[in-house]
Amino acid sequence: MKWGSGVRAARLRAGAAATTKAGYSLLEILIVLTIIALIAALVGPRLLAQLDKSKVTTARVQIRALQTAVGTMHLDIGRYPTSSEGLNLLTTNPSQAQGWAGPYLSGGLPLDPWKHPYVYEPPADNAGQPKIFSYGADGKPGGQGLDADVYNDAGA
């Protein structure tokens, strides 16, 4: 019995010692937080740059879809929308265009990724193609970087 009680006492002392040493010091926690902050400072800007790139890609995809819808409507009514009709003719037919079989877009007319309407310029003559584009992040003509105008194909 003496032996068993000694073992129990040793285990109790070892457990008590282990519980007093368990846990992290404030210094260790601050070091870990500093490392996490440094990683976030290095990785964060790269992630934001990827987000901005994805907005440009999204705009190009939406422009391509709008061009396809305008092309389909052109086949139906024999002409492109006028400046006053614009892209709204894809979803509603206020002019009662002959042969209009829309709406040509499901879900309505989208805004660009920066929440601005897309710009529509009709062709100068019937042989040309209309231009559909976004003014970019700033919503103004021209610009550089994210503020640059976005076209489906390299500026044409």
Image (tube, rainbow, N blue to C red):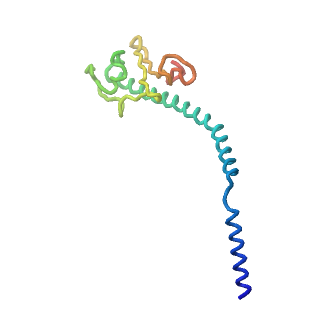
Expressed as whole percent of the image width and height from the top left, the position of residue 91 reads 32, 27
Whether residue 71 is situated above or below residue 34 in the rendered picture: above
The answer to which of 141 and 8 lies nearer the viewer is 8
Name the residue nearer the viewer: 90 or 16: 16
x, y percentage for residue 119?
43, 20
Whether residue 93 sits left or right of residue 112 in the image: it is: left
Q: Nearer the viewer, residue 13 or 84?
A: 13
Residue 124: % across, % down? 41, 11
Q: Given the current orientation, which residue lies at the most extreme top position? A: 124
**In the image: residue 2, left or right of residue 105:** right
Residue lying at 72% horizontally and 71% vertically, measured from the top left: 14
Horizontal relation, residue 86 to residue 46: left or right: left
Q: Image quarter for residue 49? A: top right
- Residue 105: which quarter of the image? top left
Q: Kindly identify the residue that appears in the image at 68 percent across and 70 percent down.
A: 16
Using the image as rendered, state which of residue 48 and residue 4 is in the foreground: 4
- Decide if residue 38 is on the left or right side of residue 148: right
Q: Quadrant of residue 70?
A: top left
Q: Quadrant of the N terminus?
A: bottom right
**Residue 120 image offset from top left, x and y in percent:** 41, 19
Q: Is residue 5 above or below residue 24?
A: below
